[in-house]
Image (cartoon, grey):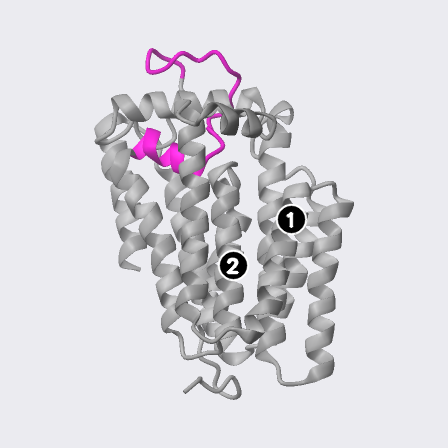
Amino acid sequence: MVLLGACAGWSLITAAAHGGRPEGMLLAVLAVAAGYAAGRVSGTLLPVAAPCAGAAAGLALAVTLPGLSPGPWYAAPLGHAGATAALLALATGAACCAAWATAVPGLRLGLRVLACAVVAAGAVLGSAAGCAASLGVLLCSLVAGAARSRGVWLAAPAVAAGLVAGTVWAVAADALPGGLAGALGGRFTAHRTGLWRDALWLAGRNGGLGVGPGRFGDPGPQAPRTLLSEGKPHSALLQQAAEQGLVGVFLLAAVFCWVLYALWRIPRSTPIAVTAGAALTALAALASVSNALSFTTVTAGAGLLAGWATARPWAGGAPEP
């Protein structure tokens, strides 16, 4: 709560300094906090039913809301892909956490079938990123049954998220070696990498307070606007750097690291902690290359999953020795 309060406070400070619009950041903080509180309460009372219902709801949202982008229709593919993939990854994580939370073999099998259905839905919807992220979460959850030291299993996601974020920053700065740059060149469109370079350009000239929240897409002399944008650089990392400076980047990373630390400390089973960590790491990776965190459904879903995984059930779910 202290970190989320700091995120909200810093957005207000940077908005006051540059006349920005902090409402988007405040809404995201509110969604995460509300989702986390609801997840803790519902996970305590209904440790299996609550994440199961959440997984079904996430799958339904991904399937029934194809026009999920907040931007104009011509920008929808960028936003829609990230939001759909994030919802599918979170839904898979919730279903797998519910499977590990129950001691009934038949119910556990049914919940894993639900997780497989989410992976298949990603393929049917044409979301390659969603299918890959969901499959990765499912495999991590299955392998987590043999995990003994959760610290190592939760450190790996942190390293993976850091590598993705560092790669995005290097792509924006044209700092990758020639061979690696060529290999990654076909993975991201010129439109997207151009937005990243614009964001890094702004971050390099406004490293302290940034240009103000919500001001990335504003017309003006801040950056050469050669690309069509709906106000999002499609990278949470670079958006924070451009709009709220290095402090904003630090706060964003601190929230993610705190969630992993909380999962390391929870008294629940290691598979639940590892599964939730894998799903939230998939979200962090998707947020580094898209505007997934611009959607209230995604930020609230992340808070819900973190709450469900860290909740302490009244009955069952005995803590590990």
Give the residue at mark 2.
278
Q: Position of residue 180 (x, y in %)?
A: 50, 29
**Placement of 68 over or under 161, stated as above or below:** above
Helix, strand or loop at disc 1?
helix
CB atoms of marks 1 and 2 within 8 Å: no
Residue placed at 47% from the left, 39% from the top?
288
Task: Give the quarter of the image for residue 24.
Answer: top left
Q: Amino acid at mark 1?
A: Ala
Task: Give the quarter of the image for residue 151.
Answer: bottom left
For residue 203, say whether it is visible: yes
Label of residue 132 in the image: 1
**Placement of 60 over or under 290, stated as above or below:** below
Between 47 and 104, the residue placed more toward the observer is 104
Mark with earlier residue (1, 2):
1
Span of residues in magenta: 219-244
Magenta stretch prevailing secondary structure: loop
Q: Residue 224 in magenta? A: yes
For the N terminus, the image quarter is: bottom left
Residue placed at 75% from the left, 47% from the top?
123
